[in-house]
Image: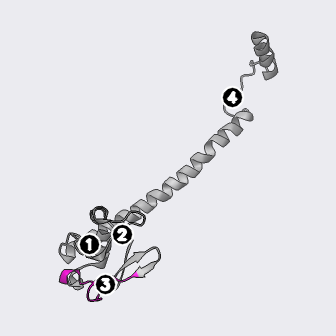
Amino acid sequence: MIAFSGKEVELARKNGTRSPKDHRKNKKADFHNTELESLSIGYLESVMNSETVFKQARERISGIGTPDLHLIEIRDFKIPLCSIEEQMQIVCVVNKLFAFADKLEAAYTKAKATLDKLPQSILANAFRGELVVQNREDEPASVLLKKIKAACF
C-alpha cells in the first residue's frame, strides 16, 4: 500500500513507514525532478495502487523467500501523467466509484445475511406445516408411514 501525506511521499510497509531514499546520497526520491505542485497526491496514490504499477512491480520483484523490490527499480516505473485538471477529474471519478463499491458491498452483505437465514426459516415453516395450505382430505402422516412400511417390507 502506498500512503501519502502533504508533499511527502512515503512507501508504507507492514512493519512501518519508510521514506524513499536515494541509495547513494541518502536523499529523498525526486521522482525524476517532477514538481509535486503539478501532481495531485490523490492521483498519484490511485496510480501507485493501480494494476499498471502492480504489474511493473511484479516484473521487477526479486528474491525467493522474501520478495524484494529495490528503490532503484521503483524509480524506473512508468507513471502515466496528465494535466493537473485531468488528475483531479480522475481522482473525483475514482472516489465516486469507490463510494459506489462500498454501497454495493453493504447491500451484498445485507442480502447474504438474509439469504443465509432463508433455509432455516423454510425448514421451520415446513415442520410447522406452514409452507402450503393443508388439504383436509389428506390422510395423517401416521397412516402414510404405515403404507410406506407395508410397501417396503
Q: Is disc 3 placed on a helix, strand or loop?
A: loop
Q: Residue 21 got which mark?
A: 3
Q: Please report whichever mark, 4 or 3, sits nearer to the chain's N-terminal start.
A: 3
Q: Position of residue 135 (x, y in %)?
A: 71, 22
Under mark 4, the amino acid is: Val
**Magenta span:** 18-34
Residue indicated by mark 1: 73
Q: Is disc 2 placed on a helix, strand or loop?
A: loop
Alpha carbon separation for disc pair 2 and 1: 10 Å
Under mark 2, the amino acid is: Asp
Q: Position of residue 132 (x, y in %)?
A: 66, 30
Is 120 within the magenta?
Answer: no
Residue indicated by mark 2: 68
Q: Please report whichever mark, 1 or 3, sits nearer to the chain's N-terminal start.
A: 3
Colouring of the image: one colour
Alpha carbon separation for disc pair 3 and 2: 16 Å
Q: Please report whichever mark, 2 or 4, sits nearer to the chain's N-terminal start.
A: 2
| Rendered view: 101 above or below 29 | above
Residue indicated by mark 4: 133
Alpha carbon separation for disc pair 4 and 3: 75 Å
